[in-house]
């Protein structure tokens, strides 16, 4: 990265994180960004990069925590496992943050996955822009809670999935086996997409 670009990046990141410090418990993050700025000005580029990478990982963890809270509770008659999250470094899969939760009802099972900055987003956005690709892959374009959704469902084995792209950055996938179609769309509709969009 060009030195001037790196300086601008550090300054922008420092302002953004400092602004959110009280809400995100960002003291450690702010300190890391300040250290990165000091190390950069002193010519300690490796130390600056290490601090920036670590700060980025902490920010992704906080983002994952915010996304976890938006995984819906189990609907009536269903049970839900504890949600889980994972994040990758900026050099791996673009720094993706992913959360998921599993749900069960008798023999039925369903999983909701939410991925931010997923490498799958580009392909999904291309699918949304071409209705012929959607129908050709066995899907149907629908609107769920104001969001465009691709719904695929096999009535013979009662399995399917719903994919929704939120704000061009977040991919929501609901997958189910031995489930009625309306269970998939009901769980999709139980997600607060406005709050999810704000986590970007």
Image: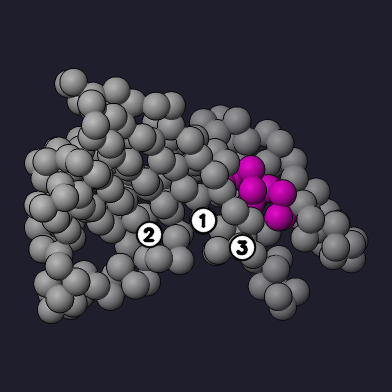
Per the image, label 3 sits on a secondary structure element best described as: loop
Q: Is residue 145 visible?
A: no
Q: Where's residue 109, x and y in %?
A: 28, 36
Tell me the tag on residue 96.
Answer: 1
Point out which mark residue 169 bears.
2
Q: Secondary structure at mark 2?
A: loop
Looking at the image, which is closer to me, 16 or 98? Answer: 98
Residue at image position (68%, 48%) is 55
Snapshot quadrant of residue 148: bottom left
Magenta region, main secondary structure:
helix
- The answer to whether one can see residue 24 in this image is yes
Lateral position of residue 178 relative to residue 31, left or right: left
Asked if the residues shown at circle 1 and circle 3 are in contact, with their CB atoms under 8 angstroms apart, the answer is yes
- Relative to 37, say whether 3 is above or below: below
Residue 83, above or below 43: above
The residue lying toward the viewer, choosing from 119 and 195, is 119
Where are the magenta residues, as a range? Answer: 52-60
Name the side, left or right, on which 8 lies relative to 36. left
- Read off the residue under disc 3: 92
Q: CA distance from mark 1 to mark 2?
A: 10 Å
Give the mark nearer the N terminus: 2 vs 3: 3
Q: Residue at x 48, y 35 (%)?
A: 84
Q: Position of residue 128 (x, y in %)?
A: 21, 70
Find out whether residue 59 is within the magenta segment. yes
């Amino acid at each position: 990265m060009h030195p001037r670009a790196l300086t601008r990046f550090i300054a922008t990141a420092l302002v953004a994180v400092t602004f959110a410090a009280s809400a995100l418990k960002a003291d450690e993050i702010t300190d890391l960004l300040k250290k990165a700025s000091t190390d950069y000005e002193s010519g300690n580029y490796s130390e600056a990069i290490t601090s920036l990478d670590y700060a980025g990982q902490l920010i992704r963890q906080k983002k994952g925590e915010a996304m976890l809270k938006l995984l819906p509770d189990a609907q009536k008659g269903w049970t839900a496992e504890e949600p889980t999250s994972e994040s990758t470094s900026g050099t791996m899969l673009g720094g993706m943050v992913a959360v998921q939760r599993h749900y069960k009802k008798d023999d039925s099972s369903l999983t909701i996955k939410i991925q931010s900055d997923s490498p799958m987003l580009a392909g999904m956005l291309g699918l949304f822009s071409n209705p012929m690709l959607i129908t050709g892959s066995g899907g149907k374009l629908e609107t769920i809670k104001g969001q465009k959704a691709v719904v695929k469902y096999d009535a013979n084995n009662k399995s399917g999935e719903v994919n929704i792209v939120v704000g061009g950055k977040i991919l929501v996938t609901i997958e189910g086996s031995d489930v009625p179609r309306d269970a998939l769309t009901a769980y999709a509709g139980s997600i607060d997409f406005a709050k999810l969009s704000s986590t970007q």
